[in-house]
Image (tube, helix red, strand yellow):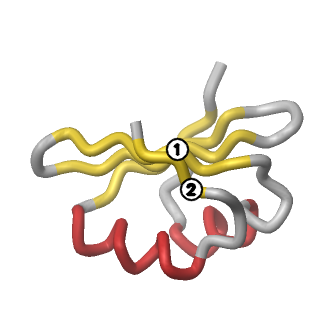
Amino acid sequence: MPKEIFDKEEFIKLSEVARECRVKRLGDIVKLKLRLRRYLYTIKVKPEEAEEILKRIKCPVREL
C-alpha cells in the first residue's frame, strides 16, 4: 500500500534515495509519487507548490 506524506520537506528528503518521481496532474491538484525500494510515497499539492518541489527533487521525474 502507498503511504501518503503531508510534509514537503520530508518528501524532498526521501527523493534523495528514490528511483523516480511520477507526476500526475489532476486539474487543481498535482499528485507526486516517489518510488522507493520498498514503498510508494505520495503527496497531493497545488500546482504552484508542485513546481517548487520538482525543482528541488533529486531523482528522475516522469510525467504521467
Few, some or many residues within 10 Å of mark 1 (<14, 14–19, 20+): some
- Residue at 62 percent across and 35 percent down: it is 3
Q: Residue 44: give x, y in percent of width and height.
A: 37, 49
- Vertically, is 5 above or below 37? below
Q: Residue 45: give x, y in percent of width and height.
A: 32, 58
Q: Residue 4: give x, y in percent of width and height.
A: 54, 41
The CA span between labels 2 and 1 is 6 Å
| Element type where label 2 sits in the image | strand
Question: Count the marks: how many?
Answer: 2
- Vertically, is 57 above or below 26? below
Quarter of the image with the C terminus in it: top left
Q: Residue 11: give x, y in percent of width and height.
A: 62, 63
| Element type where label 1 sits in the image | strand
Quarter of the image with the N terminus in it: top right
Q: Which comes before the other along the chain, label 2 or label 1?
A: 1
Question: In the picture provided, is 61 more to the left or to the right than 15?
Answer: left
- Residue at 70 percent across and 62 percent down: it is 59
Q: Which residue is mark 2?
A: 61
Q: Are marks 2 and 1 in contact (CB under 8 Å)?
A: yes
Q: Which residue is mark 1?
A: 22
Q: Mark 1 belongs to which amino acid? A: Arg
Q: Mark 2 belongs to which amino acid? A: Val
- Residue 16 versus residue 59: which sits nearer the camera? 59
- Residue at 63 percent across and 42 percent down: it is 41
Few, some or many residues within 10 Å of mark 2 (<14, 14–19, 20+): some
Question: In the picture provided, is 52 more to the left or to the right than 62?
Answer: left
- Residue 54 versus residue 38: which sits nearer the camera? 54
Question: In the picture provided, is 27 more to the left or to the right than 29?
Answer: left
- Residue at 74 percent across and 61 percent down: it is 14
Looking at this view, name the residue that lies furthest to the left. Answer: 27
